[in-house]
């Protein structure tokens, strides 16, 4: 019996291979992809399971308008599930759709030692009007802390800070020629 268990015990005693934090270019690419997937799933797809896969268990979100929005991944996902249900046919906000776009050129990524990275940038928000067109309704800045998960070989969002929310910028800008 012991001879049958030996390989299993040896496998458990041997540490699993872990991937190091990638170099900055690769790290930035992974963060851009994860950020895009996160906001697509959260805003347009209304897909809580997809968002859950991108968040660390101890995820928390701070927002200048709402304070501590979520103190854990579970609480954030539960809140998102309620919001998605409200958008569904028959829900209190049936048909509501919104979109978030990162402002091109505003994103910076800085490694945080061997355990993660800090992403900073600006984003703008849109809502779909009754005629189907998208209307920019505001903008803000953000800082996201991504934790490197060496056994998974990928990043998970551990903390998000969203601040400086304001009205949409005038468009076209003052003084621009049509």
Image (cartoon, rainbow, N blue to C red):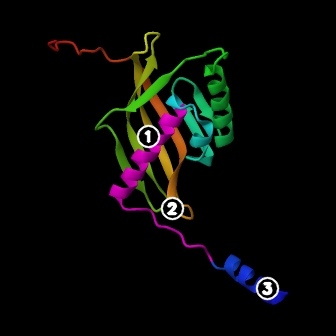
Q: Residue at x 66, y 24 (%)?
A: 85
Give the side of residue 176 with respect to residue 94, left or right: left
Mark 3 or 2: in front is 3
| Residue 75, numbered circle | none
Q: CA distance from mark 3 to mark 1?
A: 47 Å
Residue lying farthest left? Answer: 177
Residue lying farthest top? Answer: 130
Q: Quadrant of residue 21?
A: bottom left
Q: CA distance from mark 1 to mark 2?
A: 18 Å
The image shows residue 54 at horizontal and vertical percentages of: 55, 46
Magenta stretch holds residue 37:
yes
Give the side of residue 66 with respect to residue 141, left or right: right
Secondary structure of the residue carrying numbered label 3: helix
Secondary structure of the residue carrying numbered label 2: loop
Q: Quadrant of residue 66?
A: top right
Comes first in the chain, label 3 or label 1: 3
Q: Nearer the viewer, residue 37 or 155?
A: 37
Question: Do the residues under discs 3 and 2 have CB atoms within 8 angstroms?
Answer: no
The image shows residue 139 at horizontal and vertical percentages of: 40, 24
The image shows residue 73 at horizontal and vertical percentages of: 64, 42
Residue receiving disc 1: 36
Q: Residues within 10 Å of mark 1 (few under 14, many from 20)?
A: some
Comes first in the chain, label 3 or label 2: 3
Q: Nearer the viewer, residue 159 or 85?
A: 85
Magenta stretch holds residue 20:
yes
Question: Do the residues under discs 3 and 1 have CB atoms within 8 angstroms?
Answer: no
Q: Which residues are magenta?
A: 15-42
Residue receiving disc 3: 4
User: 134 above or below 3?
Assistant: above
Q: Residue at x 68, y 34 (%)?
A: 78
Q: Residue at x 51, y 27 (%)?
A: 64
Residue receiving disc 2: 153
């Amino acid at each position: 019996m012991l001879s049958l268990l030996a390989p299993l015990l040896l496998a458990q005693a041997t540490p699993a291979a872990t991937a190091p934090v990638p170099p900055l270019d690769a790290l930035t690419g992974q963060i851009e992809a994860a950020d895009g997937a996160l906001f697509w799933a959260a805003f347009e797809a209304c897909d809580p399971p997809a968002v859950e896969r991108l968040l660390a268990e101890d995820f928390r979100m701070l927002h200048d308008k709402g304070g501590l929005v979520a103190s854990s991944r579970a609480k954030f996902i539960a809140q998102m599930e309620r919001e998605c249900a409200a958008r569904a046919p028959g829900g209190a906000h049936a048909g509501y759709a919104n979109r978030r776009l990162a402002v091109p050129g505003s994103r910076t990524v800085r490694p945080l030692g061997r355990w993660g990275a800090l992403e900073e940038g600006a984003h703008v928000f849109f809502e779909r009007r009754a005629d189907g067109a998208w209307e920019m309704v505001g903008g803000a800045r953000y800082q996201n802390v991504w934790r490197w998960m060496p056994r998974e070989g990928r990043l998970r969002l551990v903390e998000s800070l969203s601040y400086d929310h304001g009205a949409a910028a005038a468009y076209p800008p003052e003084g621009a020629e049509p």
